Amino acid sequence: RKMAAGLLAQAALSAALSSPLSGCWSRCDAVTRLASPTLFCTPSVRLAVAAEGTPPPAPLTLSKVAELVEATFVRACMDAARGDVTTLKLFIASAVGGYRLGVPLPALGSAVAACEAEHSTAGRPLLPEEAELRTLWLSLVYLTLEAEGEAAPPGGDGGD
């Protein structure tokens, strides 16, 4: 009986994750479009935006990426402790946006720290080990993109 319940739960989860209408995927897709200037320029996305009657978002900048990273990090930690990786996906999408802008990792780290100093999502300064974890996660995203052969745009000015 437990095995059958587990299989049903797994099937439901698989169906939910593969559904294009899944709330999780639509939220992740929205942030990915914000975090990825190249994704937003596709004809299907332009049509979807035109169909919804909303203007396209402003171009992605280093400050916006830093804000997205800062806003998603603490929540991603809290959610991951419960087994929910939705916010972690948003954190990753934000870091991918920084990489695709050509923002060097140290510059992104500094921008996130400055953003955190202005308004911390945690409601307090991060502990040293929390800041270290955030840097590690950002590094892993950058290293993964490099290992997969995705080239960052030349220049690396970060869009600001």
Image (tube, grey):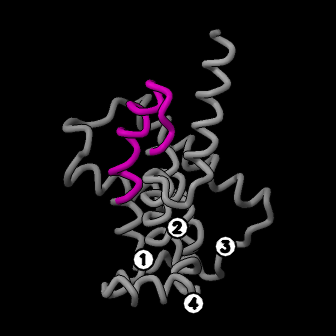
Q: Is residue 131 above or below residue 64?
A: above
Q: Looking at this view, is 105 or 75 the one in front?
A: 75
Q: Residues within 10 Å of mark 1 (few under 14, many from 20)?
A: some
> For the residues marked 4 and 3, what is the alpha-carbon distance in whole angstroms?
22 Å
Residues in magenta, as a range: 68-86
Q: Which amino acid is tagged 4?
A: Pro
Contact? badges 1 and 3 (CB < 8 Å): no
Q: Label 2's element?
A: helix
Q: Label 1's element?
A: loop
Contact? badges 4 and 2 (CB < 8 Å): no
> Which residue shows up at 73% across the image and 72% down it?
151
Q: Which amino acid is tagged 1?
A: Leu
Q: In what quadrant of the picture does the C terminus appear?
A: bottom left
Q: Residues within 10 Å of mark 4 (few under 14, many from 20)?
A: few
Q: Which amino acid is tagged 2?
A: Gly
Kindly report which numbered mark, 4 or 3, lies closer to the viewer in this rendering: 4
Residue 66 in picture, x, y percent from top left? 38, 60
Q: Label 4's element?
A: helix
**Mark found first going from the N terminus, 4 or 2:** 4
Q: Is residue 67 left or right of residue 109?
A: left
Q: Looking at this view, is 84 or 136 the one in front?
A: 84
The tag on residue 43 is 4
